[in-house]
Image (cartoon, rainbow, N blue to C red):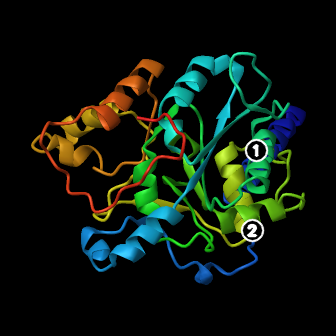
Amino acid sequence: MLAEGGSFMKGMLMGSLFCLVLSLLGSFSPRTERRTEDHHHHHIKAPSKDELGHLGDSQMQTLTNQVRVSCVIMVQPKILTFWATALDTWSKHCDKAVFYTSESSKALEAVDLAEEDEWARLRKALKHAYEHAGDLRWFFIARPTTFAIIENLKYLLLTKDPSEPFYLGKSMKSGELEYVAYDSGIVLSHEALRRLVNIFPDDDKCPERGRALWKLDEDKQLAVCLKYTGVFAENGEDAHGKGLFNSKNVESLITESMKSNPTNVVEGCCSDMAVTFNGMSPNQMQVMMYGVYRLRPYGHDFHDILKFDPPEGSDND
């Protein structure tokens, strides 16, 4: 009986120690090459109309021409319909769109990375995007299940300097780690991607294969690696502080707003300048494409100060 009691106590002790280890790992926060105080921005807001009003026509045109986006879209043959839909809809509005796959597909063109592990595949895709960036200085990383309005992303980035380390989207928190949610799209400036690619070879700070007791999702792995270089997650917002990157679809957001804000559903739902939505079927993405780019009230002028022209030779809407 005494022996059984001793075994029970040993089990309790081992269980407590295991929980302690899990707790410590959950709150893991790596050191960074730069101190947190050097991080100047946390909530990244789109410029207001008043701010744009202070810019001259030539300055406005220069900024408009400079904001060009390379889209890094991670696909797999098992979600071929989403892949085909992204190709046929929003990705046409990227200045450059490259699809990266785990294995080749005869149906659609993509860069075959021949890698099953999602984090290792994302690393390879980002390295390839950086090495083939040309004069592009902004990078948008997304799954094909995300619907993006690239012109709104360009508006958000209009006055931002890509030589600064921007890492933004929908900012989330897991323990002490802040990260940008993959499902709502991730934006990296050229400087942030440069730092990331440079730390990839350092297996202690940014391992290609996870070493934890459990596997971290790719967005958290990305945040850990970037944090070591002094780059931190930012929340993308409009001029009024509303989030621009959504991890849900429009229908879900409206339904939630009807419950929480029944007297002003649209105002409580989403920003007018939303960049992304997620969780839509391919058919719903086609409907979104119609609503965003094709449906127009006759005779109505939105009085937009800026115009983002489509990439040359593009057959976008």
* 218 or 294, nearer to the observer: 294
Front-lying residue, 62 or 162: 62
Q: In the rendered view, does 128 fall on the left or right side of 254?
A: right
Horizontal side of 317 relative to 26 (left or right) equals left
- Which residue is drawn at the image coordinates 45% and 54% (left, top)? 153
Task: Give the residue at the far left of this rendering.
Answer: 263
**Image vertical order of residue 9 relative to residue 84, above or below:** below
At which x and y percent is residue 292? Answer: 32, 37
Q: CA distance from mark 2 to mark 1?
A: 20 Å
Mark 1 sits on what residue? 125
Locate the C terminus and report the quarter of the image it occupies.
Answer: top left
Picture residue at 26% right of the left edge, 68% below the top: 49
* Amino acid of disc 1: Ala
Quadrant into which the N terminus falls: top right
Which residue does the image show at 80% across and 34% down from the upper left? 117
Residue matched to label 2 = 228
Label 2: how many Cα within 10 Å (few below 14, some 14–19, many 20+): many
Image location of residue 24, percent across then percent down: 72, 58
- What residue lies at 84% left-to-right and 43% top-to-bottom? 10
Give the vertical position of 203 relative to 59 (above or below): above
Q: Secondary structure at mark 2?
A: helix
